[in-house]
Image (spheres, rainbow, N blue to C red):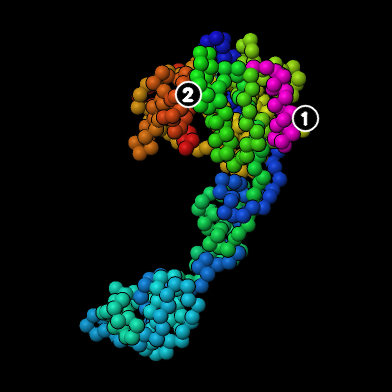
Amino acid sequence: MNGASGTRNLRSVEEQLARVLDAVRVLGAETLDVADAAGRTLAESVTAAHDIPLFDNSAMDGFAVRAADVAGASPESPVSLRVVADLPAGVSADPALGAGDAARIMTGSPAPTDADAIVPFEDTAGGLADSLREVRVLRAPAQPGAFIRRRGADLRAGDELVPAGDRIGPFQVAAAVAAGVSVVTLARAPRVAVVSTGSELLAPGEAPARGRIPDSNGPLLEQLVGGAGAEVVLAARIPDDAHAVTEVTAQALERGADVIVFTGGVSAGAYEPVRSAFDGGGEIEFVPVAMQPGKPQAFGVLGAGCLVFGLPGNPVSVAVSFEVFVRPALLAMQGRTDIHRPLAPFTADTPWTTPPGRRQYLPAVVDVAARTVRPATAGGSGSHLAGGLARARAFAIVPAEVDAVAVGDAIDVMLVE
Ligand code: AMP
Ligand code: MG
């Protein structure tokens, strides 16, 4: 099949994705320790439990002073102050400062209520030496409040830190903890079963034999599912046997799967167990989609509301189909605001060909600094070239109507790492 005649009955990627997203129901919420929340989606916004900073504190190692006392200080006429307290990190003391008094203070320590500026060590004659009896100030603070970090300057109690629908990552965990938040409300992680079909498949590490290949799709999907904030509740490898598909489906439903992802066995060959098990039942639709790789797609909803994806078995097809259909669904189930990876224009630095009438998703090597893109596989766009995936950090996306990419062409790139 080639050219217009081979592409006429294909469904567009957009339409297939719209059908998938139509079937998605947002899962319920659960509370979790914020330290365990990274990678997940917030069901409720996170608001600060207390101010950041929590108290007025010093931005420098130096001396807390009354600014008026040292307003006239200069290298020619230093001002001497009595050091009446020492305030290392962690102290709670709030020493009174009378006229001519100073307190030695370290960065982050609470600034005395009576102080209205910090003079850093660099602006004193003795610096750290002798600093517990007397200090000679060489330069007046630039303005009132100099080097005092004010309570609540960053964030006030009750302020929103992260809105509902956002992913919580390491930075958000840190900000929440800094604002006194210990528990967050997250969308429940979708429970996912990943099932590799194929009588040729070996467990990773099993001795190779003629006709047999390692099951790389299983580990690929387990990683991708985890990266989308979902939980793998079943990982299985089954032979090309429709009964095995039915059995593993029952097992996945028993484990409460919200989603089952099959790989392999969906196209029109002689031994296609996913097609044999589900085709004609009316729940799962088998449809060619105008993309390359990933043309044969299966998708549907089982009675209890479990989404079923049947992805074509080639490893590159699985990687692409996951990005295009499965990941957006897993994120939408979590109520994620932004379910799509951003696209950015890069420049092709080598020519390549693309299939007529189908959108190409090509595993690609990118030079992010130079904004250039090239195929990851020397052998072209073959969906069986699992080794090339090792070099890919992105997909180059070429529209269906383009047949060839020339050096210098602007190409949309989806960064996936
Ligand atoms: P299928 O979609 O079942 O016709 O498979 C297409 C191609 O992908 C065949 O060459 C399979 O051997 C290969 N394949 C299928 N499943 C896997 C898997 N889990 N890991 C690696 N390759 C696979
Ligand atoms: Mg197969």
Ligand 1 rendered quadrant: top right
Q: Please tell me whether residue 314 belongs to the stretch shown in magenta.
A: no
Circle on res. 303: 1
The residue at which mark 2 appears reads as 386
Decide if residue 143 is in sight here: no
Q: Measure the alpha-carbon separation of dots 2 and 1.
A: 35 Å
Q: Tell me which amino acid carries mark 1.
A: Gly
Residue 50: give x, y in percent of width and height: 58, 66
Beta carbon at label 1 within 8 Å of ligand 1: no
Q: Tell me which amino acid carries mark 2.
A: Ala
Residue 332: give x, y in percent of width and height: 64, 39
- Above or below 56: residue 290: above
User: How many discs appear?
Assistant: 2
Residue 391: give x, y in percent of width and height: 41, 29
Question: Residue pushed farthest left?
Answer: 76
Residue drawn at 38 percent across, 37 percent down: 368
Decide if residue 132 is in sight here: yes
Task: Locate residue 263 relative to residue 66 in the image: left or right.
Answer: right
Residue drawn at 29 percent across, 78 percent down: 129
Q: In the rendered view of the protein, which quadrant contains the N terminus?
A: top right
Beta carbon at label 2 within 8 Å of ligand 1: yes
Question: Residue pushed farthest bottom?
Answer: 99
Comparing 407 with 100, the one in front is: 100
- The boundaries of the magenta stretch are 240-257
